[in-house]
Every structure is written in structure tokens, then in C-alpha cells.
Amino acid sequence: MGAGWPKPNLVEPFDVFQAWDHGKASEVVCVFKDNEFDFGVDVDIVAALLEGDRQTAEKVVKKLAPDGSIINGLAFLGILAFFSRAPDRGDALRAKVGLAFDAFDLEDTNDLSRDEFTIALLSCLRALTVALGRGVPPTDSDCEQIVNKAYTDRGKDYSTSVSKHEFFDFVAAAVEGCAGFEDVLRGFGVSGLASTPAGVEAAPELFASPVKD
């Protein structure tokens, strides 16, 4: 995501998405939203999102949900947003963060509530650790505290929403000074990145579909 960062080594099948261009990832996000899929999606929906590639879909579901049933569809979109290739022109970070925001902005309001912000952060961190094959994501409570601090630091009332621009500023501030993708994850409370052997799944049972109040 950052200029000059080394390319993350992802576990199968997520490594194939690093060859996707930004436009292809954007199309999948649009298809997901246009069809108004639920948070929880099964292998049939994942295969449809992957243009009928059921073999890859089954591998994705197995990684994100070892029981082979339902995964958090928005978490999967987060993987596509952050690990697909950035556009050839323009701000790569803004493009990736913007696509992740669009995935969670299901009603295209151009903002996220504080709860939606927390769900987006939690879902992405859990998904990215599974794609990396290592790391332990922060808890729900930890993510809520991170979001609350972001609100407090910016003088925002908890009852207000976060715009796409504010969401980007939040991520950009976290990325500043980082030497690589894993540094960013550590900044968001992901632990065990150095000690967990590559290929070990990171808490995949946590990929239950988030439920809004």
C-alpha cells in the first residue's frame, strides 16, 4: 500500500488476488452491492463473485470458515481492496482505502456510522491476518477503542458518522512512517506477526457475519 513497500506474501488462495487489477476488484464490490448480498455469504455466492471459479471460491471459504459454510463477505471484499494491484495512476493508498470504504458503505451514503466503522476495521483486520497466514487480530473491544480514540482525537461526537475523506485520513495517519504492511497491522493491534509461522491460520473461526443492531 505504501510507496516502496515489499509485496506481502499471502497464503493460498489469496495470493492469486495480488494479480488482480484495481478495476476488477472494484467490479466485484459493485456486483456484491448491486445484488444486495447479506454480510454472510456461502461458496455459491463467492463463486458467483469470482465469475464461476468455484475451485478458488471453495478454498476461500475453507480458509475464512473452516466448517465450509458462511464467511463474512465484506471481509473478503476487504482482501480484494487491499491486496489487488493499485491503479497505474493516482494515489495508490487512496484508491485501496476508498474501495474498502465503498465495500462497507452498502447504501452509498458516503459515510459510516461509528458502529459501521468498527465493523469495517474489525472485519478487515481479521481478513488480512488470514490472508497473510499469521497474526492475531484485535478483539471487538480493542477495535471499538481504536475507533473511539479516532473520534476523540478529531473532536467528533460519537453519534456522528465518518465521511469517506475522514476514513482515508484515519488510515493515512496510521500508515505514515510505516516500513511495510505488517507495521500497519501492528499499529492496529495485530499481534504475533513475527512469531506465528507462515501458513498458520489466524483465528479463522472469528469470521462470523457481523450483525448490526
Image: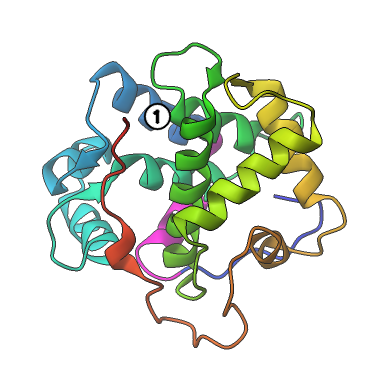
- Amino acid marked by disc 1: Val
User: In this rendering, would 129 be left or right of 157?
Assistant: left
Q: Residue at left 74%, top 63%?
A: 180
The question of residue 20 being in magenta is answered with yes
Name the residue tied to disc 1: 29
User: In this rendering, would 55 be left or right of 92?
Assistant: left
Q: Is residue 94 visible?
A: no
Q: Residue at left 47%, top 32%?
A: 116
User: Does residue 170 lie above or below 179 as drawn?
Assistant: above
Q: Which residues are magenta?
A: 11-22
User: In this rendering, would 69 be left or right of 157?
Assistant: left
Q: Is residue 141 visible?
A: yes
Where does residue 77 sit, x and y in percent of width and height?
41, 41
User: Does residue 70 lie above or below 129 as drawn?
Assistant: above
Q: Residue at left 46%, top 13%?
A: 108
Which quadrant of the figure contains the C terminus?
top left
Where does residue 179 sit, x and y in percent of width and height?
81, 64
Where does residue 139 sit, x and y in percent of width and height?
47, 61
Where does residue 143 sit, x and y in percent of width and height?
55, 51
Pick the residue in front: 61 or 150. Answer: 150
Pick the residue in front: 49 or 191. Answer: 191
Q: Residue at the far right: name it.
A: 177
Q: Quadrant of residue 211?
A: top left
Q: Residues within 10 Å of mark 1 (few under 14, many from 20)?
A: many
Numbered marks: total: 1
Q: Quadrant of residue 45?
A: top left
The question of residue 73 being in magenta is answered with no
Q: Residue at left 64%, top 41%?
A: 148
Q: Residue at the far top: name it.
A: 109
Q: Quadrant of residue 36?
A: top left
Pick the residue in front: 97 or 116. Answer: 116
